[in-house]
Image (cartoon, rainbow, N blue to C red):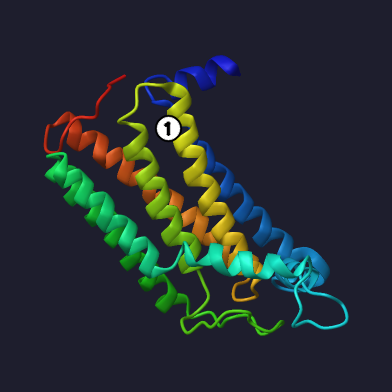
C-alpha cells in the first residue's frame, strides 16, 4: 500500500500533497455527514441540529457555550472569511506580485479567486437553502445558507495563496508551515460560522469541499501555465 501512494504522489510538491489530502478529508467528511444526517432517527440533517444545539447552553439558546470571550473571538475570526478581508488580502498579494514583476501570476490569482467567488454565489442561488433558525444568530446575515460562503471563499483564497507562497520557498518545512496556516485558517473560519449559529455544519463542510476542489484545480492550472511559460515560473521546480 505505501508503494501505491508513493507512485501516486511522486512528482507532486509537498504543498500539493497537503492540498490533495485536505480535499480528500473534506469530501469524506461531507459524505459522512450527509449519510449520518439521513439515517439518524429518520430525520434529515439530524446531525446538523445536534451540533447547533450542542453549541448553546441548555438554559438559553441565545447563549453559546464556553467563556464569554469565545463569542467575541469567533466574531473576529469569522471576519477573516468576509468579502472585505478576502478582497483586501487578494489585492495586496496581487500588488506584491506586480511589484515583483510577476504580472501573469497576479492576474491568474485574481481570476482564480474571483472565479471561485462567482461559483459560490451561483451555488447559493441554486440551492437557496434557508439559514438555520434553530438557534439565534450571533452575527447579522443576509444571503442563503448552502454552501457557506465564508467557508468556501476562505478555502479558495487561503489555500490558493498558500500554494503560491509555498512554491516560492525552497525549505520544505516552510512550505508545510504555509499550507498548515492556510488550512488552519480555513477550518477555523468555517467552524466560527457554526458556533455563531448562522450556518448548518453541512453548509460549512460543503463549502470546504467545493473550495478545496476549486483551489486544487487552480493549482493544477497554474502548474500547467508555468510549464507553458504563460505565467512566471516558481522559484524552485521538482
**Against 23, is 92 above or below?**
below
* Residue lying at 83% horizontally and 70% vertically, measured from the top left: 41
120 vs 223, left or right, is right
- Neighbor class of circle 1 (other Cα within 10 Å; few <14, some 14-19, many 20+) is many
* Residue lying at 60% horizontally and 76% vertically, measured from the top left: 198
Q: Could you tell me which quadrant the C terminus lies in?
A: top left
* Residue lying at 65% horizontally and 61% vertically, measured from the top left: 34
Q: Is residue 20 visible?
A: no
**Against 116, is 109 above or below?**
above
- The quadrant holding residue 138 is bottom right
Q: How many numbered circles are shown?
A: 1
Q: Is residue 76 visible?
A: yes
**Against 161, is 54 above or below?**
below
Say which residue label 1 marks.
15
* Residue lying at 62% horizontally and 61% vertically, measured from the top left: 191
- The quadrant holding residue 131 is bottom right
Q: Could you tell me which quadrant the N terminus lies in?
A: top right
Q: Nearer the viewer, residue 2 or 233?
A: 233
Q: Nearer the viewer, residue 76 or 236?
A: 76
**Against 225, is 67 above or below?**
below
Q: Nearer the viewer, residue 10 or 104?
A: 104
Element carrying mark 1: helix
33 vs 20, left or right, is right
Residue 231 in percent (x, y) is at 15, 38
Residue 185 in percent (x, y) is at 52, 51
- The quadrant holding residue 92 is bottom left
Amino acid at each position: 500500500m505505501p508503494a501505491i501512494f508513493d507512485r501516486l504522489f511522486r512528482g507532486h510538491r509537498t504543498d500539493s500533497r497537503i492540498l490533495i489530502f485536505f480535499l480528500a478529508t473534506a469530501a469524506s467528511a461531507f459524505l459522512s455527514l450527509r449519510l449520518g444526517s439521513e439515517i439518524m432517527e429518520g430525520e434529515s440533517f439530524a446531525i446538523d441540529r445536534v451540533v447547533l444545539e450542542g453549541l448553546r447552553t441548555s438554559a438559553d439558546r441565545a447563549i453559546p457555550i464556553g467563556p464569554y470571550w469565545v463569542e467575541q473571538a469567533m466574531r473576529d475570526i469569522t471576519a477573516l472569511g468576509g468579502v472585505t478581508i478576502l478582497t483586501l488580502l487578494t489585492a495586496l498579494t496581487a500588488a506584491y506580485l506586480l511589484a515583483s514583476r510577476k504580472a501573469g501570476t497576479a492576474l491568474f490569482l485574481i481570476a482564480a479567486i474571483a472565479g471561485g467567488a462567482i461559483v459560490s454565489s451561483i451555488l447559493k442561488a441554486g440551492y437557496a437553502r434557508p439559514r438555520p433558525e434553530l438557534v439565534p444568530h450571533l452575527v447579522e446575515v443576509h444571503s442563503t445558507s448552502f454552501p457557506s460562503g465564508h467557508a468556501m471563499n476562505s478555502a479558495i483564497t487561503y489555500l490558493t495563496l498558500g500554494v503560491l507562497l509555498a512554491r516560492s520557498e525552497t525549505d520544505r518545512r516552510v512550505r508545510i508551515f504555509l499550507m498548515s496556516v492556510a488550512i488552519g485558517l480555513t477550518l477555523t473560519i468555517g467552524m466560527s460560522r457554526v458556533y455563531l449559529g448562522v450556518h448548518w455544519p453541512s453548509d460549512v463542510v460543503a463549502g470546504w469541499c467545493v473550495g478545496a476542489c476549486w483551489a486544487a484545480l487552480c493549482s493544477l492550472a497554474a502548474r500547467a501555465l508555468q510549464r507553458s511559460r504563460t505565467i512566471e515560473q516558481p522559484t524552485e521546480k521538482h
